Structures are given as C-alpha cells and as structure tokens.
Image: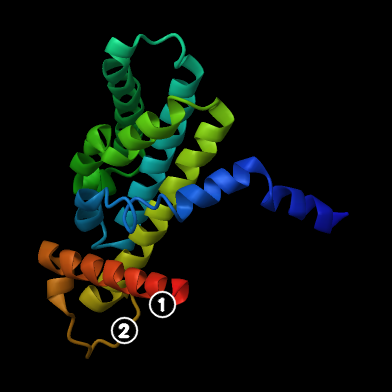
Amino acid sequence: MKRSFFRRILFSQYFQIFKKGFQENNPIFVIIMGFCSTLAVTNQIKNAVIMWIAVTISSCLSSTTISLIRKQVPLKLKTFVFLMIISTLVITIERCLRILAPDVSQQIGPYIGLIITNCILLGRVEAFALYNPPGLSFFDALGVTTGYGVILFLISIFREVLGAGTFLNLQVLPQSYPPCEILSSGAGGFLVLASFIFFANYLKEKFSA
C-alpha cells in the first residue's frame, strides 16, 4: 500500500514538474540566472538560506497568483501586473525580515529587494505560470527555487568553512587554520561559482556520454 502511494507520487504530474524545475530548468547550472544574489549572499550559510527562503516564497506565491488571474490580465498590461504582484510580496518579506532578523536584514536586505527584478521569478512567470494552472505553476516555481537554493547552500558551505573556518558562525576548523579570505570576497564567490558550474557540466557530459 505504501509502495503504491509513493509510486503514485513519484510518477504524478506535479512531481515531474518539480523534478524538471530542479534539474532541467536549474537557474544557475542550466538557465544561467540569479548570479548577482548567488555571489552576494553565499559568503555565509545563514544569509544563503534566508535568501533561498525569500526567493522560494516570492516565486511560489507570485507564480500561483499570476496563474490564477492569467486569463483576466490584458497582454499589454501583463508585465506591469507581474511586477506589482512580485514587488508586493518581496516588500512584505523584506519588512518581515527587518522585524524578525534585523542583523541579517542589514547584511542582505538590499539583495532581498532586488528579488523584484530577479530573472528567476520573471522567467518562470513568463515561461510557465502564464500558460498553466495554479497547482502546476506552484510546483514549477518550487522546483526551480529548490534547485537554486541547494546550489546557494552548497556554495555558502564551501565559502564560509574555508573562507572563515566557521559553519553557521561556529568555529569548526582549528584556530591554527589560516582562513582563505579571498573566498569571502566577491571575487572568491565568482571563482567558487565558476568551479561549481564547471564541475556540474563535466559530470553531465561524463554521464550522458
């Protein structure tokens, strides 16, 4: 009974949409989007996770909302309506972050605001939510942002541990370890991101051959 239940989930249309968003439409490795936030917030794991959550909530709610009203929005006004919905959600999240985590808000607050123009959100709205029902649009956005968030999380682990010797601001490497400070800078973030993309493409070619 349990096996058939999980089998239905794995082969359901919603899971397939989620999987496609996570793999084939991965915004960093495949579509090549969201680089600015990736470089800016992955110097610390906490910042990367909060950005992941903010982008996920914004994308899922905006895709679902726009899918619900897609037939009522004139084509000439669609971009304006999309930006209004996304900006309202992002501003709400940014205000909540100021209240709940003011220290984190000071560090990544400006980048939270830039979610409004993030190509990941606008891209999924234009490519999927505008033509599909709300349920599928939600899982598409969830899959894409999960793929985005996992990469953010992995890069932030690499940068924080080797760049500062800490994990979630807790010392995990010996005090004698000389931190590789370049990994905490923007240039270091670019190098780590480029290395991850190179490694991912290498594995893709190797296993698809």
Q: Nearer the viewer, residue 36 or 177?
A: 36
Visible in this render: residue 22? yes
Q: Nearer the viewer, residue 64 or 125?
A: 125
In the rendered image, which residue does mark 2 sit on?
Answer: 173
User: Quadrant of residue 97 in the image?
Assistant: top left
User: Which residue is at the far front?
Assistant: 209
Report the side of 19 relative to 192 (left or right). Answer: right
Question: Circle 1 sits in a helix, a strand or a loop, which is it?
Answer: helix
Task: Name above or below for residue 138 compared with residue 186.
Answer: above
Choose the circle earlier in sequence order: 2 or 1: 2
Task: Name above or below for residue 130 compared with residue 184.
Answer: above
Tell how many labels.
2
Position of the N terminus, as image quadrant, is: bottom right
Q: What mark, if any, has residue 206 been given in the picture?
A: 1
Point out residue 127 in the picture as x, y percentages from the top left corner: 39, 33
Point out residue 18 in the picture as x, y percentages from the top left corner: 54, 46
Looking at the image, is mark 2 or mark 1 nearer the viewer? 1
Question: Circle 2 sits in a helix, a strand or a loop, which is it?
Answer: loop
User: Which residue is at the far right?
Assistant: 1
Spatial separation of the CA atoms under disc 2 and disc 1: 34 Å
Mark 1, Cα crowd under 10 Å, few <14 / some 14-19 / many 20+, is few
Q: Nearer the viewer, residue 127 or 66?
A: 127
Q: Amino acid at mark 2?
A: Leu
User: Quadrant of residue 153 in the image?
Assistant: bottom left
> Mark 2 near mark 1, Cβ–Cβ under 8 Å?
no
Position of the C terminus, as image quadrant, is: bottom left
